[in-house]
Amino acid sequence: MTTKHSPLRVLKAQADTIAAALKAAERGEKIASDPAGKIAASIAKGIVKFAVAMDDKIISIEMPWSTIRETSEVGIAEFILKHMREQRETMQ
């Protein structure tokens, strides 16, 4: 498990894995056993909600499938990583 203070390479690997799974699901690939059809239902609904479990917290993220479709895997991983490290978007 990780915390926001875990080594960057560990957090990045976790974010990369999540982003890869999201992109695979968006392409219609089977990413997990889903007998209840929750993944297909979220695609039909147009939005996915997922959680990132860490030692010190659980992060809940909601993303539209259209954003996942339009964003690269690297971009999604960076977005997740920012949430994991509790970094805020700043306006300059």
Image (cartoon, rainbow, N blue to C red):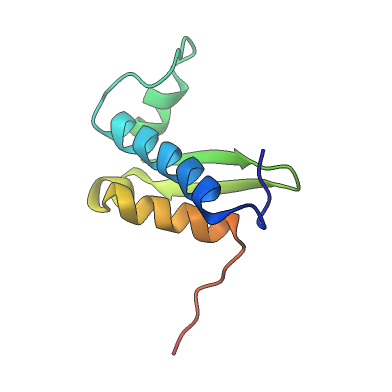
Residue 68 image offset from top left, x and y in percent: 32, 47
User: In terms of depth relative to the viewer, which is nearer, 62 or 4?
Assistant: 4
Is 83 displayed left or right of 1 in the figure?
left
Is 51 displayed left or right of 9 in the figure?
right
The residue lying furthest to the bottom in this view is: 92
Residue 54 image offset from top left, x and y in percent: 67, 42
Q: Residue 41, located in which quarter of the rendered image?
A: top left
Residue 48 image offset from top left, x and y in percent: 45, 39
Quadrant in which the C terminus is drawn = bottom left
Q: Residue 46, located in which quarter of the rendered image?
A: top left
The residue lying furthest to the top in this view is: 35
Q: Residue at x 65, y 56 (%)?
A: 4
Quadrant in which the N terminus is drawn = top right
Residue 73 image offset from top left, x and y in percent: 30, 47
User: In terms of depth relative to the viewer, which is nearer, 59 or 9?
Assistant: 9
Is 70 displayed left or right of 50 in the figure?
left
Question: Could you tell me how many numbered marks the image carries?
Answer: 0
